[in-house]
């Protein structure tokens, strides 16, 4: 708690002092490993961060942060199957965490576990309907399993949530074209083009939106 206060106040000297005190008094504390892991993580020292987070979850398996970080490191390294159990443990601690729900679904999809991915990504959208990546991933998982009409409806739902995002109608246009629904595909493609054109005109006028 003192170190969190030091961080909030920007008092590095006090933070170092309190960390050293904690190291001296509680050398086997799980929080030492979490803090060291965070320090390495921020410096992009992935191997060192992974070592500390693994030590933390060995001492306390149900902690959210080290499990979430281990999942992230595995995912970023392309080790999607390895990321899955860490995301699952993170979600056991925080079931409604948006990123953990979404990336568990995406890790399952990339690991080829499509039925599980579909179930998880639907869950992610229930948890946070504004999680754009969840719609993208779910549409791909449904497409991978040959459920193109459901993928189209997923993208249509995404368009309702994100009316200024051209990627969703563009993706829907490609799926509709695969389904042979040419007129619907053309309509979706026009919608994507309209959004892109509107964005370009806003940028030309200096509107950040």
Image (cartoon, rainbow, N blue to C red):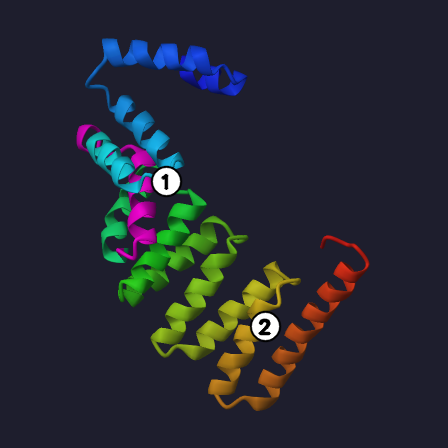
Look at mark 1 in the image and give the residue it sits on. Answer: 44
- For residue 169, the mark is 2
Asked if the magenta segment contains residue 70, the reply would be: yes
Q: In the structure shown, which secondary structural element does the residue marked by tag 2 occupy?
A: helix
Q: Is 187 on the left or on the right of 66, as rendered?
A: right
Q: In this view, does 110 lie above or below 191?
A: above
The span picked out in magenta is: 58-79
Residue 9 drawn at (x, y percent): 53, 16
Query: Residue 160 occupies which quadrant of the picture?
Result: bottom right
Residue for point 30% across, 66% down:
115
Asked if the magenta segment contains residue 66, the reply would be: yes
Q: In the structure shown, which secondary structural element does the residue marked by tag 1 occupy?
A: loop
Residue for point 39% across, 77% down:
147
Residue 26 drawn at (x, y percent): 23, 13
Quadrant in the picture for the C terminus: bottom right
Quadrant in the picture for the N terminus: top left
């Amino acid at each position: 708690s003192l170190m969190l206060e030091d961080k909030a106040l920007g008092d590095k000297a006090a933070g170092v002092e309190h960390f050293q005190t904690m190291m001296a008094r509680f050398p086997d504390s799980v929080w030492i490993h979490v803090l060291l892991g965070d320090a390495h993580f921020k410096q992009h020292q992935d191997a060192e961060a992974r070592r500390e987070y693994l030590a933390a979850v060995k001492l306390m398996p149900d902690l959210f942060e080290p499990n979430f970080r281990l999942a992230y490191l595995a995912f970023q390294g392309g080790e999607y199957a390895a990321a899955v159990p860490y995301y699952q443990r993170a979600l056991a601690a925080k079931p409604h965490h948006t990123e953990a729900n979404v990336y568990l679904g995406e890790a399952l999809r990339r690991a080829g576990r499509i039925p599980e991915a579909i179930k998880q990504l639907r869950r992610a959208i229930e948890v946070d309907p504004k999680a754009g990546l969840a719609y993208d991933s779910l549409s791909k998982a449904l497409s991978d399993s040959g459920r193109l009409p459901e993928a189209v409806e997923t993208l249509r739902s995404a368009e309702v949530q994100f009316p200024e995002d051209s990627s969703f109608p563009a993706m829907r246009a490609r799926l509709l074209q695969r389904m042979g629904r040419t007129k619907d595909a053309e309509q979706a493609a026009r919608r994507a083009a309209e959004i892109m054109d509107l964005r370009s005109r806003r940028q030309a006028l200096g509107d950040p939106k």
